[in-house]
Amino acid sequence: MIEFLNGADWVTAALAFLAVFLGALSLVLIAELVRNWWVQRAVRSRLNPLISGQETSGGLLRADEYEGALDKVVNQLSDRSGLGTLMRQSDSTWSVPAFIFISFALAAGTGVASTLVMQSNLARLPFMGIAALIPYFILRHRRTQRLDRFEEGLPEAIDLLSRAIRAGHPLSSGVGMVGDEAPEPVASEFRTLFEEQRFGIPIDEALMGMVDRVQLIDVRIFTTAVLVQREVGGNLAELLDSIARTMRERFTIRRQLRVYTAQGRLSGYVLAVMPFIVGTGLWILDPDYMGALLFTYLGRLMLGIAFTMWIFGFFWIRKIVNIEI
């Protein structure tokens, strides 16, 4: 007979995971509070002479002036790896070092918990890796949701900009109106665009900055149209109306494609959850039969191969049914 873990072992493992993770999360929160306090103190020391009139001029306040050496190194690595862009696009309030520390905390907590229920060091590594990637997948999900909302609200924002230009407002003023009246997250991006050009950045560079922040084909189309119109001239309002109409037609086609591929997505979800349902049912009906799969070296090896193929098949089906236009 195969010995199974009793309920006390699983409770102990869960408590160990919570203790490690919550302890690490407390350290992250304390470090963030200390860092914010230090930055606020440095900014106040910089502004007090200006407020009191002891200094009549000063340079712009830059955020990187108040970063520590570790923050600068981590931010440079995150920009090269794309993590910084991902956090900005997902509108995350966490700093990059805090995000990395939380990932390590999840991996450490999972490692401590799995030590109590597993005896193979090799078997613990996949669970630790999956736990460390959870914050990353959360950020990707938030970015996808935010970009979807941006894409849905962009045609209305372009219509508003077109009406502002027809009413006699310049492009910069129309961008400010979109930033004030459009829904989020479109409003925040157009406010950033308006503030950048108001503080002296050329409108061309500010538009390219929005393209870098919001990596959507619709934003590239809008930016390209505005830049070309500024070079060759023409009726910008009619051009914006044409762009908004094109975007709505793309949305219509995309929704039709989602209807056509609904069966494929449903099949993918069913196939994704079927192994877990069947495995749970077999566990309830015959624990000894499933124990040979879970608590032997050959069984774990087969589970690892099956799990790898499961991940590959799930993302393959998602790639097939996700048709980009």
Image (cartoon, helix red, strand yellow):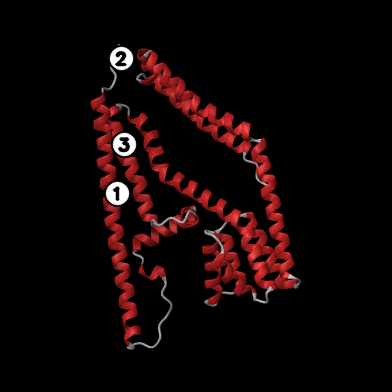
Instruction: Give the quarter of the image for residue 110.
Output: top left
Q: Is residue 80 left or right of residue 104?
A: right
Task: From this view, report whether residue 168 is shown above or below residue 112.
Answer: below
Q: Residue 39 location in percent, x, y?
A: 32, 68
Task: From this view, report whether residue 47 is shown above or below residue 128.
Answer: below
Secondary structure type for disc 2 = loop
Viewer-proximal residue, 117 or 280? 280
Dot 1 corresponds to which residue? Answer: 25
Verify CB contact (< 8 Å) between mark 1 and mark 2: no
Dot 3 corresponds to which residue? Answer: 111
Dot 2 corresponds to which residue? Answer: 2
Query: Which numbered mark, 1 or 2, is in the foreground of this view?
Result: 1
Quarter of the N terminus within the rendering: top left
Q: Residues within 10 Å of mark 2 (few under 14, many from 20)?
A: few
Q: Residues within 10 Å of mark 3 (few under 14, many from 20)?
A: many
Viewer-proximal residue, 187 or 1? 187
The answer to which of marks 1 and 2 sits earlier in the sequence is: 2
